[in-house]
């Protein structure tokens, strides 16, 4: 038999915490970029003088300033708490799904590895933003745009960076939650699981087709030529429902 159907708590709240804690970093990145470019502007109302290298130098200054004010250790502090809370959520979810209390699944090393990956991902948001700003300023100089126009476009780039950070937060919290859930179930001796979706309009069609599929927890589900697990793909919000067997074959949709 299987335990009664229980829907776990998805780590969306953890992702919101992630982005909230990252907001000062993103705000400072935009503020420094705007301030440095304003100082580099040679003539009021015009972006840059004939030497657009001044803009490039200004953006290099932003990179250096961000490295100084937001070193890896500080960024690690931003996301570490989120990682710890996401691990706890994953453990609580497995406890809800199995009826067995779970604690201490993820090691300090595993959390530290997750933090390291996320610090690197956060830096990619910064690098992408500064690269886009560099192109934006160069194009603006060539077309003779006024500073007001460029300033507005800088804000649009900042909004895109926040969206990129939001995607990273949601994807990384979901992945960590899924990894903790899988490891906890394996420790409890769970051999098979059933793929479940969150059952809402955000579920992607190809994952909706997997809903109800039973699979070996160690092998995952065969999907498009490879093996995957709930929550392992980018932005996947699906979860694993453990099959708790007591000598009775569980009802299932199919197997993969």
Image (cartoon, rainbow, N blue to C red):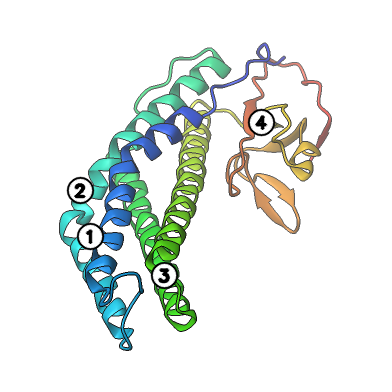
* Left or right for 205, reference 97: right
- Residue 37: image quadrant is bottom left
Element carrying mark 1: helix
Spatial CA span between label 2 and label 4: 39 Å
To which residue does mark 4 refer? 193
Mark with earlier residue (2, 1): 1
Tell me residue 45's x, y (percent): 34, 69
Mark with earlier residue (1, 4): 1
The reply to whether residue 254 is in sight is: yes
Residue at the far right in the pictured view: 253
Residue at the far front in the pictured view: 44
The reply to whether residue 106 is in sight is: no
**CB contact under 8 Å: marks 1 and 4:** no
To which residue does mark 3 refer? 146
**175 relative to 243, above or below:** below
Q: Nearer the viewer, residue 119 or 2?
A: 119
**CB contact under 8 Å: marks 1 and 3:** no
**Residue drawn at x 63%, y 31% as measured from the top left:** 240
* Left or right for 63, reference 69: right
Number of labels in the image equals: 4
**161 relative to 16, above or below:** below
Mark closer to the observer (2, 1): 1
Spatial CA span between label 2 and label 1: 11 Å
**214 relative to 133, above or below:** above
The disc label shown at residue 74, or none? 2
Element carrying mark 2: helix
To which residue does mark 1 refer? 66
Mark closer to the observer (1, 4): 1
Spatial CA span between label 1 and label 4: 45 Å
**Residue drawn at x 77%, y 30% as measured from the top left:** 212
């Amino acid at each position: 038999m299987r335990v009664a159907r229980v829907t776990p708590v998805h780590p969306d709240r953890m992702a919101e915490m992630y982005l909230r804690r990252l907001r000062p970093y993103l705000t400072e990145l935009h503020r420094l970029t705007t301030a440095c470019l304003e100082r580099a502007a040679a003539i009021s109302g015009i972006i840059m003088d004939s030497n657009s290298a001044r803009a490039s130098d200004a953006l290099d200054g932003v990179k250096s300033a961000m490295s100084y004010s937001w070193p890896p250790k500080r960024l690690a502090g931003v996301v570490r708490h989120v990682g710890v809370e996401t691990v706890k959520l994953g453990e609580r979810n497995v406890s809800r799904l199995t009826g067995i209390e779970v604690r201490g699944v993820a090691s300090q090393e595993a959390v530290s590895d997750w933090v390291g990956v996320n610090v690197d991902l956060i830096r990619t948001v910064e690098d992408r933003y500064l690269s886009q700003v560099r192109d934006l300023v160069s194009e603006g100089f060539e077309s003779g745009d006024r500073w007001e126009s460029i300033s507005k476009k800088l804000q649009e780039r900042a909004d895109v960076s926040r969206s990129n950070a939001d995607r990273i937060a949601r994807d990384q919290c979901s992945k960590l939650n899924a990894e903790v859930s899988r490891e906890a179930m394996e420790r409890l001796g769970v051999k098979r699981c059933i793929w479940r979706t969150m059952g809402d309009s955000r579920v992607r069609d190809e994952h909706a087709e997997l809903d109800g599929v039973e699979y070996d927890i160690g092998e995952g589900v065969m999907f498009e030529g490879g093996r995957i697990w709930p929550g392992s793909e980018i932005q996947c919000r699906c979860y694993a429902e453990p099959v708790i067997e007591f000598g009775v074959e569980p009802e299932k949709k199919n197997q993969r």
